[in-house]
Amino acid sequence: MQKTGIVKFRVSFTIILILASLRTAFAQDPEFSQFYANPLYLNPALSGSTICPRAMGSYRNQWPGLGKAYNTYSFSYDQYFGVLHGGLGLLVTADRAGGGSLNTTTIGLSYAYMFNITEKLNASLAIRGSYYQRRMVWENFIFGDQIDPRSGEVFRPTSEKAPDYSSIIAPDFSAGMFLDYGGLVYGGLAVDHLTQPKNGFYADNTSRLNMKVTAHAGSVINLKQGYGGDEEREFSISPNILYQQQGSFHQLNLGAYLTFDPLVVGLWYRHNFENADALIVLAGIHYKNLRVGYSYDLNVSRLFSVSGGAHEVSASWQFPCFERKRKIRAIKCPRF
């Protein structure tokens, strides 16, 4: 097959994968390997968790070897308001699949009520309401019956039935809880798509966006004991676990962060229960109010030879804090 044919094959292969999600109920949310760098996406109960205002952004390029297969963008802003006894957060995500052939956009507002259970045990309960839009560009799709098997060129229209709708809009709701014990041990539970909005593009389609359940937990272990360093400079290891379930999809992430301020490194293993998925390596830096992180997913499944893994970049800015009198402590958990 000529080079042009290979390119066409990769694009059509990607879009066929996308098309499969249009006719079934197995749509899956995009994910971020640096899930603590996108805390509001992970769990709405983390809205306002650092007390001070913060702005965060993430970009993920998944399977670049297949030609713009999946590109996901995220932006969030949150802070704690004493008068509300909790945090407010804004989360915007945009997922572009198949070079923009299938686009999903969500805009959500969250409120997290924060309170002390004991002197050391803090809790947060949250709810989020979102605007959900899923849009497709049918003209961008290339199917096998359109491609000349000898030259790889597109030479005729497809026989596939065009969808009845090009765009779907629906309200969406999430809820979450988070517990933190003295900044040493923490964990949370989040449930997204509580109402399971319809997301099919065909009139006779009953496809719904499956509910997603996320459970996460971790701890921070201080390594300064016996280490004669700067007391203000963090030196710690933070083991973490993440479990997600959405429809028939199950995923488990196991790993740890090593922080030697201002540097952070991490190593993760992601397992999809049905098959091993990826090893994730991470490196980040913290300079004053700025945090920047990069991670790479090394695919260990059968897609290894063609997918190109996944690249992810995150950045956050911590604004000065104006809450002088408060009874709630900032939650100490990883930032990548």
Image (cartoon, rainbow, N blue to C red):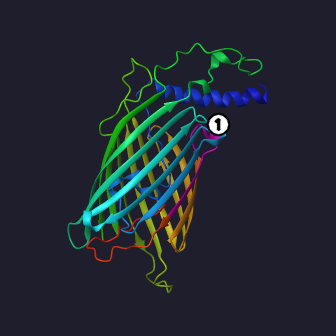
Say which quadrant the N terminus sits in: top right
Asked if 119 appears above or below 212 in the picture, the reply is below
User: Residue at point 47% right, 76% down?
Assistant: 234
In the image, farthest residue toward the left: 117
> Taking the image as drawn, is residue 85 in sight?
no
Q: Position of residue 233 (x, y in %)?
A: 49, 79
Image position of 29 (left or right of 180): right
> Taking the image as drawn, is residue 284 in sight?
yes
Where does the magenta region start and end? 299-316
In the image, farthest residue toward the right: 2
As for residue 198 lying within the magenta part, the answer is no
User: Residue at point 60% right, 31% down?
Assistant: 14
In this view, the residue in front, 43 or 6, is: 43
User: Residue at point 63% right, 19% down?
Assistant: 144
Image position of 178 (left or right of 301): left
Image position of 148 (left or right of 212): right
Q: Position of residue 308 (x, y in %)?
A: 64, 43
Asked if 206 appears above or below 329 in the picture, the reply is above
Q: Position of residue 189 (x, y in %)?
A: 31, 52
Q: Position of residue 211 (x, y in %)?
A: 34, 38
In this view, the residue in front, 292 or 237, is: 292
Estimate how packed mark 1 is, as few (under 14), some (14 to 19) or many (20 or more) residues with alpha carbons within 10 Å. many
As for residue 307 lying within the magenta part, the answer is yes
In this view, the residue in front, 243 or 164, is: 164
For mark 1, what is the residue? 66
Amino acid at pointer 1: Leu
